[in-house]
């Protein structure tokens, strides 16, 4: 087995850990940064990240995208936020959130996105 094969296998395993996690609807867009280059945000989703993702995916802000407060290190959980723009374009970025804030967001039947 080559080093590339092992790396591909590790990456696929990492991606598989995201499968089955449901998207939740962010009730407010107030705590999501939008530089307006992509246009107005129509809606956004938030999802918990699986264990191990907190160090592999960059977190763009220490602020919880649900409540706008900064969780203490011992109470924060890794999450992904997926804004959907009015143009139909979607992006995903990492964030820190309170687990109770994520739990308070309405769950959808849709699986969350998987990072590339």
Image (cartoon, grey):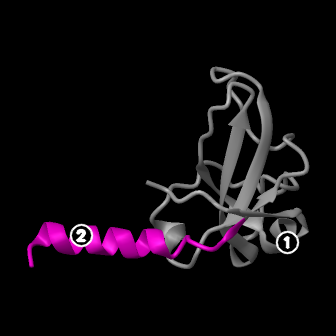
Q: Name the residue under label 1.
A: 103
| In front of the other: 39 or 63 | 39
Where in the figure is residue 78, as x and y percent of width and height? 64, 67
Disc ID at residue 82: none
**First in sequence: mark 2 vs mark 1:** 2
Q: Where is residue 92 in the image (x, y as percent from the top left)?
A: 59, 47
User: Dot 1, how many residues are within 10 Å of its Cα: few (below 14), some (14-19), or many (20+)?
Assistant: few
Q: Judging from the image, what secondary structure is the residue with disc 2 in?
A: helix
Which residue lies at the image location 66% right of the left edge and 50% below the top edge?
A: 61
- List x then y, in percent, for residue 10: 31, 74
Identify the residue at image location x=85%, y=71%: 103
Residue 19 within the segment the image draws in magenta: yes
Type of secondary structure dominating the magenta stretch: helix
> Secondary structure under badge 1?
helix
Q: Name the residue beneath numbered marker 2.
A: 7
Residue range in magenta is 1-22
Residue 68 vertical position relative to residue 48 in the rendered view, above or below: above
Q: Residue at point 23% right, 69% down? A: 7
Q: x and y percent of residue 40 in the render?
A: 77, 25
**83 relative to 113 in the view: left or right:** right
Picture layout, residue 100 above or below residue 33: below
Q: In which quarter of the image is the N terminus?
A: bottom left
């Amino acid at each position: 087995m080559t080093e590339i094969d092992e790396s591909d296998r590790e990456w696929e395993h990492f991606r598989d850990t995201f499968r089955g996690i449901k998207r939740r609807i962010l009730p407010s867009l107030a705590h999501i940064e939008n530089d307006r280059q992509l246009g107005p945000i129509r809606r956004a989703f938030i999802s918990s990240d699986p264990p191990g993702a907190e160090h592999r995916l960059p977190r763009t802000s220490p602020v919880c995208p649900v409540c706008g407060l900064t969780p203490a290190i011992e109470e924060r959980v890794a999450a992904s936020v997926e804004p959907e723009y009015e143009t139909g374009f979607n992006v995903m970025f990492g964030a820190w959130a309170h687990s109770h804030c994520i739990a308070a967001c309405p769950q959808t039947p849709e699986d969350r996105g998987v990072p590339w």
